[in-house]
Amino acid sequence: MGRESSCGQYYHVKLYCATLPPQCVRSVYTSKIISSDKDLVALVFYGTEQSKNPRNSFKHVYIYHDLDSPGARRVQDVDGLRGEKGAQVAGETMGSGNTNLGEALWCCSNLYSDIKLRLSHKRLMIFTCRDTPHGGDSERDRQARTKASDLKETGVVIDLMHLMKPDGFDVSLFFCDVVSPPEDEAELGLQMEPCGKLEDLQKRVRAKEMKKRSVARLNLCLGEGMNVAVGVYITALQSRKPNAIKLYRDNNEPVHTKTRLYHTQTGSLLLPSDTKRVQVYAGRQIVMEKDEVDVIKKFSDPGLELIGFKPMERLKLHHHLRSAVFIYPEEEMVTGSACVFTALLRRCSVRNVFALCKYTRIRNSPPRFLALVPQREEVDDGQAQIAAPGFHGIFLPYADDIRTLDTPQLPTASEPQVDKMKEIVHKLRFKYRSDAFENPVLQQHYRNLEALALDLMAPEHIEDHTMPNVNMMDQRLGSLAQEFRDLVYPADYNPEGKTAPKRKPGGAEKKPKVEMSEDELRGHVQKGTLGKLTVPVLKDACKQFGVKVTGTKKQELIDALTAQLTK
């Protein structure tokens, strides 16, 4: 699976065994439909009794889905394999037979070669719970290793997603010679610990299928003649609804918009060289060429330039402007970058300092100051990487970005009130995880699309985790909320509703009418400001000067008064 790039398209083919939970396949399909609908995905089962592949050249290999873009029909096919009924359908359709991983790898190689498009990335994932797929058959093991080596030489990345088995999964018996080495130092390559839960398996699949792509590849200048190649990665990006695509009503093909500039007098087509840029300054139009504007916009060449180092305590919370970027070395651009970058990372981490740099992403972008905060590598119990080694680039504010606000003077809380609130905050604390709170609007949007595409009776219900769990909060707080209310609010305070204002005896008093003199009205007529008066005032003015009106609209009242006072 993959995404469109400048060198073509990037594709994955996935190889699954019959023990793979259908929920994982469904999750991959639905995520690809949403995020990368141009990716190509295939689902292949091996070790089956039935064979289904071109000309049935490979025994016990069943191509359940050919290499193609995932769609609603494929999701429905995978849903048919879920549960006991799905297992029965899979047994009747494919069955269980001899295992020959080499034949399966050869079949997947043919799937790649049958695609006539330019491939920029190919990944193959093997899901299995058997550490010796051929039961000790050395000839089949040799064939599988040979075919895996051929695939890796053609640029195919092979990953192992192994599942838990009762007596443990030993990757050193066979699969350590099959899977690909890590693509860079940030990846662990073959992970030794198997997945025991479906959630762990899906997490590992998502980490592998998402290709990390840098938004920029720049030189980090450490001094005169000392440059290190680095990549800039976005750590957080706001999810939005996809933009609407305009379709031609006759054939539902996407409509492509083209813009042309024409001369207003002659109607001739204008070339880019015929247009100028204008900046209004002091009431005059300053005309500039496009090249002149580009020179004005250019501050410096793209790159990162080291200015110095500062202790970590100099970095304050209020310096946060936007989400940080992640800086990682690019060994392919400049040899030795990873070694120098690692040494810099270690020394900054040991000395607890951050590097101050000037950052220019592209040629015409204004420079920003970045604080490069070091981060060492962290792995979980399953040896899966949860934090990559590198620098977090914190965007530092300019002086104009920090404002002095006039805060209103409010009553200061007493010490007992502060202590009671501290108890409440302590009771309601929890460990925050960004992935635990999904955007309910986006989730409902995609559930509606899924229900429409799969012909479901109703969209799947989503739970809005952004709403507070009132019952759990009340259970944790107990009597603390009432104690805090007694300390802060008066005894008759009602938080559930507002008390209605009391009416005065005899009803509400009417506002006195404001009479206007004839001179004031004539002044409004001359200035054209009668429209600023309210309708009741205009009606009273008409009655005061005996002006007859046929309607009650504001413009009719203004016209009548204007006609009367301009005689």
Image (cartoon, rainbow, N blue to C red):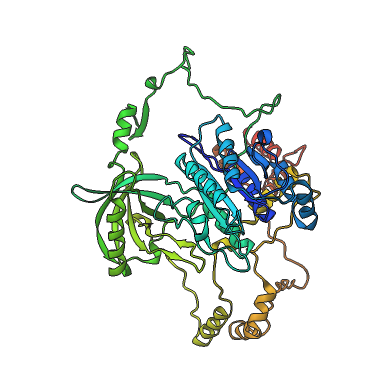
Indicate the position of residue 511 as horizontal and vertical percent values.
69, 60
Image location (x, y in percent) of residue 150 = 48, 41
Q: Considering only vertical position in the picture, is 251 above or below 312?
A: above
Q: Is residue 29 left or right of residue 87?
A: left
- Residue 522 appears in the rendering: no
Of residue 505 and residue 180, the one placed in the foreground of this image is 180
Is residue 192 shown to the viewer in this render?
yes
Q: Is residue 265 above or below residue 37?
A: above
Front in this rendered view, residue 260 or 438: 438
Judged left or right of residue 464, residue 337 is left
User: Which residue: 41% across, 60% down?
Assistant: 320
Residue 73 location (% of width, % of height):
73, 41
Question: Quadrant location of the C terminus?
Answer: top right
Q: Quadrant of residue 40?
A: top right
Quadrant (top left, top right, bottom left, bottom right) of the N terminus: top right
Give the residue drawn at x 32%, y 43%.
333
The answer to which of 248 and 30 lies nearer the viewer is 30
- 556 is higher (above) or lower (below) than 229: above
Q: Position of residue 70 (x, y in %)?
A: 65, 41
Q: Nearer the viewer, residue 89 or 94?
A: 94
